Image: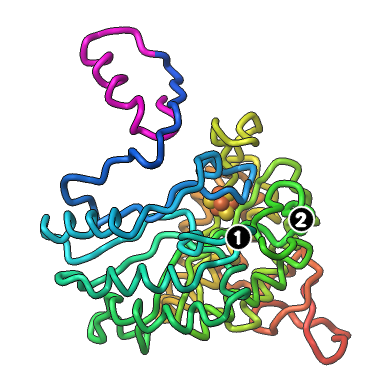
Amino acid sequence: MFQGEGEEDLISVFKKMINDEAVSPYFVASKPNTKKIPPITHAACYGMVEITRGCGRGCQFCSPTNRTKYSFPLNYIMKEVKTNVDGGSSTIFTVTEDIFLYKSKPGFIPNREEIVKLYKTIASYPGVDYILLSHASLAPVIYDQKLLEELSPILLEKTRWNPELHKSYPKRFVSVEVGIETGSVRLMKKYMKGKALPYSVDNWPELVVQGVGIMNDYDWWPLCTIMTGQPDETDDDVRATLDLIDDLKNHNAKMFYTPVLFIPLKEAMLGNNRRTNLKNLSELQWEVIARCWKYNIDFWRPDMKWMLNPIFFFSHWFYARWKHGKKATIPMMHLAGFPIAQKTNKLCTPEYCQEDVSPRNGRHRLF
Ligand code: SF4
């Protein structure tokens, strides 16, 4: 395994392998001098152009945070844009751990002027028809609300959207991947303290709802990862994640949930922890996966709810039960819309839970 950045060592490792020389099975690469990273010489897949490297927020499950945080100079980025366009790509895919890290100020304060200048320059380059984004974080959009106000018109103009093909969506939207990971403030404090900077993670669930809301106001519909199975995750932590998913739903968040399981990346601080797999999941952890997909289908493809009819459900349930055990059963029934009682304590919308015989404040409660 080759771990780290390629510029310093990758070629010599390949040469050794070609010459049948011994190579360590786990090779940790030296960090490159950022000023000497060469620009690409041929067009990349999807017109990829690296705009920053590293992150520095320090999430313990993450490996890019170990890289030196660096923003590539604008002339270097535009050289790569030119290479991609000359190579036949009309799309530029800006690659970064977080677009708002680009030339950010100390303390993870976003640098609006530089970010807007970057995207304006890329958008106005002849031959660039579309711009794609990789990752972003939520705190900067709350910190500087003019950021999306200025950036959105540039990006919406360069978003791929065909009203004939995309009939379910009434207008263009910008998409970007955002890491929500958990609704548990306890886990955030333990493993991801820097994720909310320049804010504290003490109010993480509220920050998430606010950040996604601001994104939606400017027609950004993020794809959000929700991670379960982190080391030491308790039922209370999972319930907090389910609560956050419900809160987003109650705020009519326009987003795509990507439920993921914790994976110990070797280079990350949590690299020595046990990998979670579907066999170890508790019923509540299965519920996270099921609820994310239920909300995805409800929002993105309401016309496909037929897929969740009993025939579809039972054929898949028999397989899932055989493969993953009975802990998946109840969550899969929730996913299929069966009116089965839930094991969480969260107030929720009537659509997703059974009515309590004694509803408090006229609301509904999961039980
Ligand atoms: S914010 Fe994202 S890229 Fe940065 S350390 Fe956390 S997981 Fe890694």
Which mark identifies residue 237?
A: 2
Mark 1, secondary structure of its residue: loop
In this view, the residue farthest toward the bottom is 362
Q: Is residue 189 left or right of residue 96?
A: right
Q: Between residue 14 and residue 266, name the one nearer to us.
A: 14
Ligand 1 under 8 Å from disc 1 Cβ: no
Q: What residue is drawn where x is 41% and y is 25%?
A: 1
What's the CA distance linking mark 1 and mark 2?
A: 27 Å
Q: Between residue 42 and residue 331, name the one nearer to us.
A: 42
Which quadrant of the structure image shows residue 214?
bottom right
Which mark identifies residue 126?
A: none
Mark 1, residue position: 108
Q: Is residue 45 above or below residue 265?
A: below
- The nearer-to-camera label among 1 and 2 is 1
In this view, the residue farthest toward the top is 21
- The residue carrying pointer 2 sits among few (fewer than 14), some (14 to 19) or many (20 or more) residues within 10 Å by Cα, namely many
Q: Are marks 1 and 2 in contact (CB under 8 Å)?
A: no
Q: Is residue 321 above or below residue 253?
A: above
Q: What residue is drawn where x is 77% and y is 59%?
A: 185
- The residue carrying pointer 1 sits among few (fewer than 14), some (14 to 19) or many (20 or more) residues within 10 Å by Cα, namely many
Q: Indicate which disc, 1 or 2, sits on the residue closer to the N terminus.
A: 1
Amino acid type at circle 2 is Asp
> In x, y percent, where is residue 320?
53, 50
Q: What quarter of the picture does the C terminus occupy?
A: bottom right
Residue 71 among those drawn in magenta: no
> In x, y percent, where is residue 339?
66, 74
Q: Which residues are magenta?
A: 1-23
Mark 2, secondary structure of its residue: helix
Amino acid type at circle 1 is Phe
Q: Is residue 332 visible?
A: no
Q: Is residue 305 above or below residue 236?
A: below
